[in-house]
Image (cartoon, coloured by chain):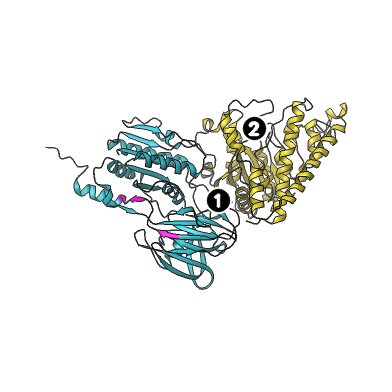
Amino acid sequence: MSLTKEKMLEAYATMKKIRLFEEKVAGLFAEGKLPGFVHLYAGEEAIATGVCAHLSERDYITSTHRGHGHCIAKGVDINSMMAEVYGKATGACKGKGGSMHIADVDKGMLGANGIVGAGGPLACGSGLMAKTLGTDQVTVCFFGDGAAEQGTMHEAMNLACCWILPVVFVCENNGYAESTPWGYHCAAKNIADRGVAYDMPGVTVDGTDFFAIYETAEEAIGRARRGEGPSLIECRGFRYYGHFEGDAMLYVTEEEKKRNRARDPIENFKKRATERGLLSEEQIAELDSKVAAIIEEAFKFAEKSAWPENKEVLTDVYVNYP
Amino acid sequence: MSTIGIIANPASGKDIRRLVTHASVFDNLEKSHILRRVFLAIDALGVPQVLYMPDYDGLVEKALKGLKLSLKADQLHMDMWADERDTTEAARQFCEMDVGCIITLGGDGTNRAVAKACSEIPIVAISTGTNNVFPSMIEGTVAGMAAGMAAREMVDVDRFTYVAKRLEVYVDDQMAEIALIDVVVCTELFVGSRALWDPHRIREIVLARAEPDCIGMSCIGGLLHPLGPRDPQGMYVRLGGGNTTVLAPVGPGLISKVDTREYRLLSLGEEVVLEPAACTIAVDGERQLEVFAHQKIRVRLTNRGPRVVDVRRYLYEASRRGVLRTVVK
C-alpha cells in the first residue's frame, strides 16, 4: 500500500470536508435556503476519498445524484460547489445545475447526474477517448446499487470490457435504492459477481474502510492505466442521511442506524492512524479547524454571490444558440 | 444429533486477489447452486432438520427456492455483522445445540472463524474461496451425502475424522487469534484489503500445514519440507536475505521466487516468538491484526483444531458396509 503520512493527512482532510459540507447542506436545506433536492454522501466518504487518491486532474470520474463527495475528492473548488448548490451565478455550472449536476471538466469531474445509471456510458466515452489517443488517463465510474440494475450500466460494463477501456466501475452499495433494500432488487445478490459475466475482475470491499478501499482502488486503477482493462469494485456501506433530504428513512431500523454509526469511516480512520502514530491528535485537531473554516467560507461565498441574470437561461444550452 | 448446521460465507472468493492475481470470482449464485445440491442430498438421506447461518446475500434462501424437501430448514436467530463474527456466532450456536455435523462453504478463513467457537462437531468443508488448504473441492451432492450419513450416524464418523492442528496467536500473552493453516507477519501497517500476495512484504511464516500441492503461504513451506494435516509438526519460515529460494505459487497464477533465510520444524506445543515490529499479522491468508512494535507476539502450534471429516474415506467405508445398498428380492 503506497500510503505516506502526507497522503493520510490529505485523505483525512478530504473525508472531513465531505462530512462537514454535507452537514452544512443538510442544515441549509432544512432552513429552506436551497432549491431543488439534495442527496447527501455522509457515511460514504471513504469510498470517494480512497478511490480518487489515485487519480490526477487528467483522470476522469463520472458521478451520481449523490455527487458532492465525488466532487470534493476529485478536487472541485468547494466555494463553487456550494454556490452551485445554492443556484448562484458563481457556481461550478453558473448555478444552472444545482446539487445533482455539479461538473468541472477541468478537474476531470464529468458531472453529477440526476439520471440513475447515466454515468456508465459517459465513462465509456472518456475511456474510449483515452484509449484512442493512447494516453494513460483512467476514468472511474461511480454508481449506486440502484443504478446497478439499470440497463445502461450493463451496456457500459459490456462495452468497456469488449473494448478493454481504462475504466474502473465503483459501485457504492449503500444498501438502499431510494427505499428499496438491495437484496430485494438484486437477483444475483452480489454486484461484484457481475464481473464474471463481463470478463473483468469483481471485488467486494468494506465501503467504510478507507485503507481497504485505497489498496483495492490502487490495484484496479493501476491495472486500467497499464491497459489491462476494466475492473468492478463493489463497496458495501451505508448512508447516514435519507435518499434525499426530507426522506424520513422509515425503511431503516434504529438498530441498523446505530450499528452504522458505530462503523463511522472517519472515526475508524482517525483511530487507526493515530494509534499507529502516523497522525497526531494535534494534526487532526488542526485539520478539523481548517476544514471547518473552509466550509464556513464556502457558505459565506455562496450566500453573498449573485443570482444568475435572466439572460443566462438561454446560454450554455446548445453549443450555438440560434 | 441428526440435525445438520450449514455455514455458507457470502464474502469468500471476492477479495483483491481478483485484481492482483489470476483468481476467479467465486460467484454467490454458484454457492447457492452448491447448497441446493447439498440440501437435496441431505434430504435424500432422511435428515429431518437443517439449521443455517443467515447472511445478507441470502445464499440459503436462494438455494431453497422452488425445492420440495421433506426436511425442515430453519435460520438461526442471531444478530448479523456481515463479517466473520456471523460465522463464529453460528458455529457457537451449532456447538451448543450439538448438531451432528457442520457443512461449511468458504475458504480457510471461514473454517478458522468456525474453529474459533467450535472444535467438537465434525466439519464437512467445501471450498469456495481462493487459496484454500483446509477445505476441499468436493461436489456439493457428495458433501451432502457424507454429512447426511454422519448426522444420522449411518456410519460412525469419528473413525473418519482427523483433528486439525491449530496455531494460537498471543499478543502480550493474551490469545488474540487462531489459524488452521498459517500465521504470517506482513510488513504492511494496515489490514487494508486483507489478502497477501507479495512475498516482499512478508517477513515470517508459521505453518500448521506445509503443502506443496496448494497455493499460498502453505506452499512456500511445502516446497522446503512437506507437512500434511496429520503430521504432528508445524514449521517456522524466515523470509528474506537467505541462500535458499523457492519458486512458489503464492496466488492463483502468480508464481514468485521467494527468498528464505531459514526454516525449522515445530513440535506440537512448541512456541515461536515473532520478531518485534509494527506490522500486520495475517491468519489463514487474511491480514487480521494490526500490531505495534512494543507488543510481544507468540505463536503456538497445538492439536486443538476442529474435527474434519475425510469425505473420501468415509464414503468408501459406507460403500464397503453397503449403507446405501438395497437388494431387491
Task: Give the image quarter of residue A312.
Answer: top right
Chain that bears disc 2 = A
Question: Residue lying furthest bottom in this view?
Answer: B243
Q: Is residue B283 left or right of residue A315?
A: left
Q: Which residue corresponds to mark 1?
A: B16
Question: Which of the image's four quarters has the N terminus of chain A?
Answer: bottom right
Q: Element at badge 1?
A: loop
Task: Give the image quarter of residue A276.
Answer: bottom right
**Residue A299 visible (yes or no):** yes
> Does B292 appear above or below A122?
below
Label at residue A295 = none
Amino acid at the residue labelled 1: Ile
Magenta region: which residues?
B300-311
- Does residue B306 belong to the magenta stretch? yes
- Does residue A141 belong to the magenta stretch? no
Task: Give the image quarter of residue A305.
Answer: top right
Residue A259 percent across, percent down from the top left: 58, 36
Label at residue A116 = 2
Q: Which chain is cyan?
A: B
A313 vs B195, nearest the viewer: B195
Q: Is residue B143 left or right of residue B55?
A: left
